Image (cartoon, rainbow, N blue to C red):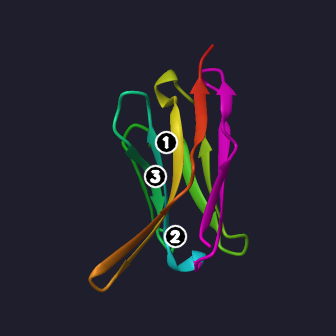
């Protein structure tokens, strides 16, 4: 059974930091690209950051220089270190595991964790 379980969300003041974690099980974690998406109220879900199976990273322009995605294949866990948080970072953050095969794609999602940036 595939599971992605996010943790680490919460309430933080502007300028503060949080680290999100996503623990994975039920699939070959090291073969999958891992991503963090977020969805704010009334907005579409957007890609925040991704990391390939070989460690290449990609970030949304809005978080470049503030957020860092990393993975620990030994622990089947992906992290999102979020620094210099802004109120506009408030959203539900979702972990995604993605695999692109020959002619098909497989995606798994976590249940989401709330991040609220407010004074």
Label 2 neighbourhood size at 10 Å, few (<14), some (14-19), many (20+)? Answer: few
In the current view of this chain or complex, which residue is farthest to the right?
75
Q: Position of residue 44 (x, y in %)?
A: 34, 38
Mark 2 vs mark 1: give the one in front: 2
The answer for how far apart the CA atoms under marks 2 and 3 are is: 12 Å
Measuring 67% from the left and 70% from the top, which residue is drawn there? 76
**Residue pointed to by mark 1:** 65
Measuring 51% from the left and 22% from the top, which residue is drawn there? 87
The answer for how far apart the CA atoms under marks 1 and 3 are is: 12 Å
Mark found first going from the N terminus, 1 or 3 = 3
**Residue pointed to by mark 2:** 55
Residue 49 shows which numbered tag? Answer: 3
* Secondary structure at numbered mark 1: loop
Label 1 neighbourhood size at 10 Å, few (<14), some (14-19), many (20+)? Answer: few
Residue 83 visible from this viewpoint: no
Q: Position of residue 18 (x, y in %)?
A: 67, 38
The residue lying toward the viewer, choosing from 66 and 86, is 86
Is residue 74 positioned above or below 108 on the image?
below
Measuring 65% from the left and 73% from the top, which residue is drawn there? 73
Membership of 66 in magenta stretch = no
Membership of 20 in magenta stretch = yes
**Magenta residues, start to end:** 1-28
Q: Is 89 on the left or on the right of 114, as rendered?
A: left
Assign the N terminus to one quadrant of the image.
Answer: bottom right
* Secondary structure at numbered mark 3: strand
């Amino acid at each position: 059974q595939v599971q992605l379980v996010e943790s680490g969300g919460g309430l933080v003041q502007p300028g503060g930091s949080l680290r999100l974690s996503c623990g994975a099980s039920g699939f070959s974690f090291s073969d999958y690209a891992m991503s963090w998406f977020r969805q704010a109220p009334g907005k579409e879900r957007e890609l925040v950051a991704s990391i390939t199976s070989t460690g290449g990273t990609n970030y949304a322009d809005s978080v470049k220089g503030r957020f860092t995605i990393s993975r620990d294949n030994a622990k089947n866990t992906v992290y999102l270190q979020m620094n210099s948080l802004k109120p506009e970072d408030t959203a539900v953050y979702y972990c995604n595991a993605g695999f692109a095969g020959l002619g098909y794609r497989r995606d798994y999602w976590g249940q989401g964790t709330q991040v609220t940036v407010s004074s």
